[in-house]
Image (tube, rainbow, N blue to C red):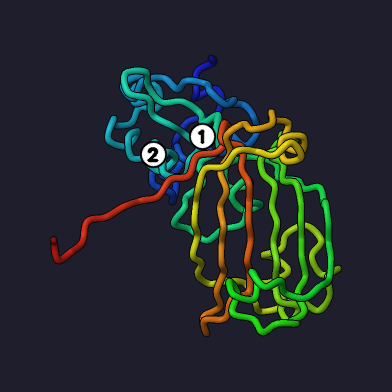
Amino acid sequence: MASLVSVIGSLDEKHSLPLYQQLQRGLRQAIADKLLQPEDALPPERDLAEEFAISRITVRKALDGLVSEGLLTRRQGSGTFVSGRVEKNFSKLTSFTEDMIARGRVPTSTWLRKARGTVTPEESMTMGLSPGTPVYRFHRLRFADDAPMALEYCTVPAFCLPSIEAVETSLYVALEQNGYRPTRALQRLRAVLFSSEQARLLDAQERDPGLLVERRGFLRDGRVVEFSQSFYRGDTYDFVAELNTSESGA
């Protein structure tokens, strides 16, 4: 690998951004531009400090931030690498599109189905909707850099959108434009084995391990405006969450 200074440029002490943020921004852009590829190893922190003429503390702070974003990963005894797998922060309410863009990936989707209907008994119970309530269903195959990543099946109450055509690429953008983007959600994660159809769409093998994430998205007033089931390839996706100890102690 060429020196990182030649890839992202030198840092400027007179710049309005702190040095660690300048380094983060440069690395983030290099990953987005594919100048740093998945699984590329970064030089040791000591070498980075010398190369950019900054302290190791500054280097560590910059890398820590990118690790928390999922762009970099640390491996005990091996060093720091550009993430080859996607890391999804399980504690943040973001869309697939937002997650991919934040990680320098190019998100695309293939629509499998857009349909109007009424709630099923399961949806009625899960979403707290009366039987017969009109809903829209959106089924799609999600890609990152043209690689299949997830199958997503989502149901939203029809009152959230002016029409089914309002969703062009991003469901959350459409919901936000109409004032119905969820502000909080409950998610459940469990392991599954792919069916033959799921495996075909995800370029996997039947009964390969996958991850199913079920999400209920809520408005501030408590109404459920999203029920989704997303099947992720287990070999490309990691879910992470930050945990903190209770202030009061236990």
Image position, residue 230 (x, y; %): 63, 51
Give, as a three-letter code, the residue at label 1.
Leu
Q: Which mark is residue 111?
A: none
Q: Which residue is mark 1?
A: 27
Image quadrant containing the C terminus: bottom left
- Whole-angstrom CA distance, mark 2 to mark 1, is 9 Å
Relative placement, left or right, of 184 versus 50 is right
Q: Residues within 10 Å of mark 2 (few under 14, many from 20)?
A: some
User: Is 47 drawn above or below residue 96 in the view shown?
Assistant: above
- Examine the rendered structure and indicate whether residue 68 appears above or below residue 157: above
At numbered mark 1, what does the secondary structure look like: helix, strand or loop?
Answer: helix
The front one of 185 and 79 is: 185
Q: In the rendering, which numbered label is found on residue 62?
A: 2
Callout 2 touching callout 1 (CB < 8 Å):
yes
Q: Residue at x 55, y 38 (%)?
A: 237
Residue 242 picture location, percent across and down: 35, 51
Vertical comparison of 216 with 141: above or below: below
Q: Residue 159 appears at what percent x and percent y?
A: 73, 82
Residue at image x 45%, y 22%? Answer: 42
| Closer to the camera in the image, 195 or 54 | 195
Which residue lies most toward the front here?
121
Determine the secondary structure under disc 2.
helix
Amino acid carrying label 2: it is Ala
